[in-house]
Amino acid sequence: GQQVMQIPQYQHVQEGEDFTTYCNSSTTLSNIQWYKQRPGGHPVFLIQLVKSGEVKKQKRLTFQFGEAKKNSSLHITATQTTDVGTYFCAGGRNKLVFGAGTILRVKS
Amino acid sequence: DAGVIQSPRHEVTEMGQEVTLRCKPISGHDYLFWYRQTMMRGLELLIYFNNNVPIDDSGMPEDRFSAKMPNASFSTLKIQPSEPRDSAVYFCASSPGQGINYERYFGPGTRLTVT
């Protein structure tokens, strides 16, 4: 079935360092969504990308959708302790499938 | 808006007991989704409803699981009998549309522990 692979599974960074998580699919995606789940919380929608090569920014977060619409990335510049959590991508063609998530820990 | 409401927030039960999880979607959202989250399997879609009608239940693990949506503002997920491997966080989510272009609004989840 349709799968969305996400890497890395886990990343531990020093506060102030950058962080990137990647989302890959073997098939072309119609769109990609990104969610953040704080520890003990629930997934919260961050953004959606639809167009090939699209780049969107939210303060220190930069989201990209690949030209072939098969991959996406989320980059956080100068991480802060408030960025801690699990970041999920979700995409598909007919059905929204969630990736396994990347757990981000930030050392202060 | 209160967002998606789930109850209970925590449930601890013994193997073999019946468990019922409850969800109230955001008013006006026509789609309701039940997800299960575990460390091993991540976030899995169990079933979703459109206008109270179950559309896709292919993610329901087995006959012990059942879900209903008697009206637009209420849904239940029932496990009978429960087993330790059912221990997980169960999320309800709602959306104004099913399509992949619609974001999911998740509830706070029910953490289920089956001993």
Image: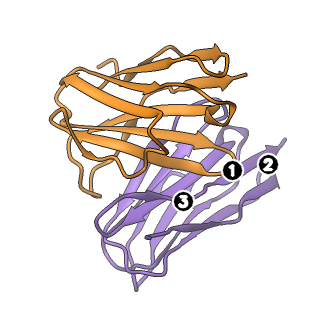
Chain colours: A purple, B orange
- Give the spatial CA distance, label 2 vs label 3: 25 Å
Do callouts 2 and 3 point to residues on the same chain?
yes
Quarter of the image where one finds residue B72: top left
Image position, residue A72 (x, y; %): 50, 71
Image position, residue B96 (x, y; %): 21, 40
Disc 1 target residue: B40
Q: Chain of mark 1?
A: B
Do callouts 1 and 3 point to residues on the same chain?
no
Query: Which label was assigned to residue A15?
Result: 2
In this picture, residue B43 sits left or right of residue B83: left
Image point (66%, 22%), residue name: B15
Image point (47%, 43%), residue name: B62
Kind of residue at badge 3: Gly
Image position, residue A52 (x, y; %): 34, 79
Kind of element beneath mark 2:
loop
Disc 3 target residue: A99
Q: Chain of mark 2?
A: A
Looking at the picture, does residue A75 appear above or below residue B72? below
- Give the spatial CA distance, label 1 vs label 3: 13 Å
Quarter of the image where one finds residue B63: top left
Quarter of the image where one finds residue B111: top right
Please state which of residues B107 and B60 is positioned toward the viewer in this rendering: B60
Upstream in sequence: badge 2 or badge 3: 2
